[in-house]
Image (cartoon, rainbow, N blue to C red):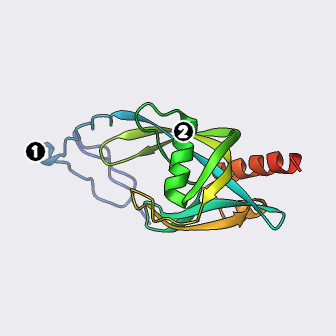
């Protein structure tokens, strides 16, 4: 049978039933210093879905890159705006660098807005996505200046939902499919 808890010891912690009171020596207590909030950085990127019609089926060029955990994930090509680039200009450039495919903007698909933290900052990232029609080039990741894209593939637009790693990008692929089906 357990004994009742003892009354609290001044400066101590009450004992659990059947236990002994804990004594905290204030000389050995740990003082927690609140950490300073991480600085916030805003980043803007652009990319999208570049399509080419092959045997009557629209295909999109997608890339495979490693996530922070080192896992390979299929995603849409995208990257930071440089200098005074517009999001449209950056999307055309980034898609060409990461896939080897040149394209022409057909329409805006949407904007993805998210947050993530690094070791030294919090990042608020806004990514503008566009639907592009392929105008030339051949599929390769050799032109990626950052070397982030490890592979590239042509995937039927109707199958992107089962290939793309991120839900927001899958929603953009669905929007692109609606646009492309409406143009047939």
Q: Is residue 42 left or right of residue 164?
A: left
Where's residue 63, x and y in %?
56, 62
Which residue position holds label 2?
89
Residue plotted at (56% across, 44% down): 91
Q: Residue furthest front?
A: 136
Which of label 1 and label 2 is nearer to you?
Answer: 2
Which residue position holds label 1?
27
User: Is residue 126 in view from this perspective?
Assistant: yes
Which is nearer the eye, 32 or 123? 123
Which is nearer the eye, 58 or 76? 58
Q: Residues within 10 Å of mark 1 (few under 14, many from 20)?
A: few
Q: Residues within 10 Å of mark 2 (few under 14, many from 20)?
A: some
Where's residue 143, x and y in %?
45, 60
Q: Is residue 171 above or below residue 1?
A: above
Q: Residue furthest top?
A: 84
Give the CA distance from mark 1 to mark 2. Answer: 62 Å
Residue plotted at (76% across, 46% down): 175
**Residue at disc 2, secondary structure:** helix
Where's residue 48, x and y in %?
62, 48
User: Is residue 165 in view from this perspective?
Assistant: no
Q: Earlier in the sequence, mark 1 or mark 2?
A: 1
Q: Is residue 119 left or right of residue 65?
A: left
């Amino acid at each position: 049978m357990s004994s009742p808890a003892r009354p609290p010891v001044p400066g101590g912690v009450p004992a659990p039933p059947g236990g002994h009171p804990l004594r905290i020596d204030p000389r050995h207590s740990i003082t927690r210093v609140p950490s300073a909030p991480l600085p916030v950085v805003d980043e803007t990127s652009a990319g999208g879905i570049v399509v080419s019609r092959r045997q009557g089926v629209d295909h999109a060029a997608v890339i495979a890159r490693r996530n922070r955990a080192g896992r390979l994930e299929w995603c849409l090509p995208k990257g930071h705006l440089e200098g005074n680039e517009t999001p449209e200009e950056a999307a055309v450039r980034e898609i060409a660098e990461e896939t080897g495919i040149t394209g022409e903007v057909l329409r805006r698909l949407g904007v993805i807005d998210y947050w993530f933290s690094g070791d030294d900052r919090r990042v608020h990232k806004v990514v503008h996505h566009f639907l592009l029609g392929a105008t030339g080039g051949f599929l390769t990741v050799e032109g990626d200046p950052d070397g982030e894209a490890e592979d590239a593939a042509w995937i039927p637009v109707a199958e992107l939902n089962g290939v793309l790693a991120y839900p927001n990008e899958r929603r953009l692929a669905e929007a692109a499919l609606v646009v492309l089906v409406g143009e047939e």
